[in-house]
Amino acid sequence: MITEERFGKILELIEEKRVVKVTDLSETLNISESTIRRDLTTLNDSGKLKKVHGGATAMGGSFATMDYDVQLREDHYREEKKRIGRFGASLIEKNDFVFIDAGTTTEAMVDAITERGAVYITNGISIAKKLVQKGCRTIIIGGEIKPITDAVVGSEALGCLQKYHFTKGFFGTNGVDLGAGFSTPDPTEAQVKREALVRSKVAYILADPSKFNQTAPVSFGALEDGEIITTKLSYKTYGKRTKIWEVDGQ
């Protein structure tokens, strides 16, 4: 298959699916993954698609319909997630009763936590393990395990959350959009996020730059329901209520 033909087929698949993985492109087109990666780099540089870790998205593709596997997402915006996580961890104080949502950005925050005088509640399997290893008092909610995001979800998880009131909550998101608010692809995960968010005195949304102007199928909160932590350097208010902490260079 000549180069231009490969490019055309790749762009057709991305236009159809909006998000594609290198492995899927390789299998569908019967082309090596190394060749697909080079093609994606070329198409990214020419502005025809957006290359991301493990695959690519359509340009202007503001609709995020799927969850990536945890391992696929860990390397995406890794340094930004570390900075966001360090800032989030600095907000936790002694005697706080903290909810931590499952996710790679919230997990980066857990890596930076030093406050052992708080109590931590989470629906993230790996997050709970890390907190325990740090010597933190940790409660993991019960329910169904969603392997792709390492999250506990479902009706049992909702029931567990309904007895709690958190001083602070930290949440991941797939999309941050003025109209759709905070959103995620999975309805069961959105329910857990929403329940924990409304039970948090202050809710912090940890969002790397790729999440802005994106909309996933299910909203779990409006922008004014939480304070966004992302990268850059100052504290600003967007609109009348939406607060954004920009924490670049931390």
Image (cartoon, grey):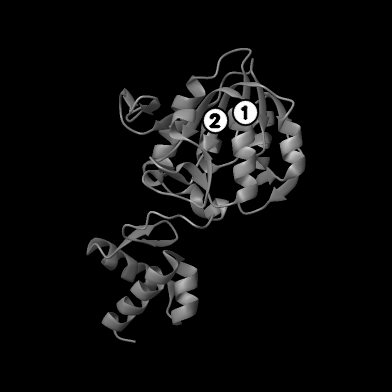
Examine the rendered structure and indicate whether residue 22 appears above or below residue 142. below
Which residue is drawn at the image coordinates 55% and 25% (left, top)? 113
Give 23 or 203, whichever is nearer the viewer.
Answer: 203
Which residue matches tag 1?
Answer: 99
> Where on the picture, by quarter, is residue 77?
top left
Residue at 68%, 41% (x, y): give it: 125
Q: Secondary structure at mark 1?
A: strand
Q: Is residue 50 left or right of residue 180?
A: left
Q: Could you give the CA–CA distance between mark 1 and mark 2, rounded to whole angstroms?
A: 6 Å
The residue indicated by pointer 2 is 170
Return the x and y of residue 75 as percentages of the image width and height.
Answer: 46, 49
Contact check, label 1 and label 2, Cβ < 8 Å: yes
**Neighbourhood count class around disc 2 (C-alpha, 10 Å): few under 14, some 14–19, many 20 upward:** many
Q: Is residue 184 above or below residue 225?
A: below
**Numbered label attached to residue 183:** none
Amino acid at the residue labelled 1: Phe
Q: Secondary structure at mark 2?
A: strand
Q: Residue at x 44, y 29 (%)?
A: 224
| Residue lying at 63% horizontally and 37% vertically, measured from the top left | 127
